[in-house]
Amino acid sequence: MMPVWFPWMFIGGVLFIVLSFVGAKYKDKEYKNIQFLQDFISGSIVIAFTGVLIPDIFPPIDFPTQFSTNVHHDFDLQVGPPRLAGR
């Protein structure tokens, strides 16, 4: 079974990318493409360490285990000749 904090690693990585990008633009520095990967990995590692040390701070994220089969709507199906108007 997957730990509760595991999906939060992706969120932490994206959050580090956003914060680093904003910080670079605030200081008028260039944000290079390699920094996206470095910041994502850094954020994921921070969340992983936090998840191992304090796993109770992460609320569970529920992913759907099965896609909904209610995509098709029920329609009345008429079998046979059409009804005549007025009958």
Image (cartoon, rainbow, N blue to C red):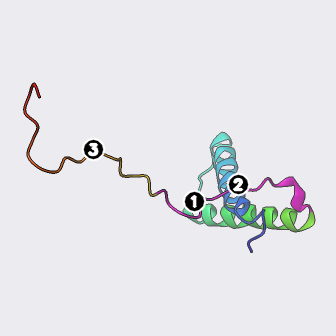
Quadrant of the rendered structure where residue 84 is? top left
Residue span colored magenta:
54-68
Q: Residue at x 59, y 59 (%)?
A: 64
Q: Which residue, given by chain and number where applicable, does mark 1 sit on?
A: 32
* Residue at 8%, 46% in the rendered image: 81
Q: The residue under label 3 is which amino acid type?
A: Asp
The front one of 69 and 87 is 87
Q: Position of residue 51 (x, y in %)?
A: 84, 64
5 left or right of 32? right
Residue ID for mark 2: 16
Horizontal side of 72 relative to 55 (left or right) equals left
Where residue 53 sits, quadrant-wise, is bottom right
Please state, as top left, top right, bottom left or bottom right, where the C terminus lies in the image.
top left
- Choose the circle earlier in sequence order: 2 or 3: 2
Query: Which of the numbered marks, if any, corresponds to residue 76?
Result: 3
Q: Position of residue 71 (x, y in %)?
A: 40, 52
Query: Tags 1 and 3 in contact by the CB under 8 Å rule?
Result: no
Spatial CA span between label 2 and label 1: 14 Å
* Residue ID at (69%, 48%): 19
Q: Secondary structure at mark 1?
A: loop
Q: Percent position (x, y) of residue 46?
A: 81, 63
Q: Amino acid at mark 1?
A: Lys
- Return the disc, 1 or 3, that comes first in the chain's sequence: 1
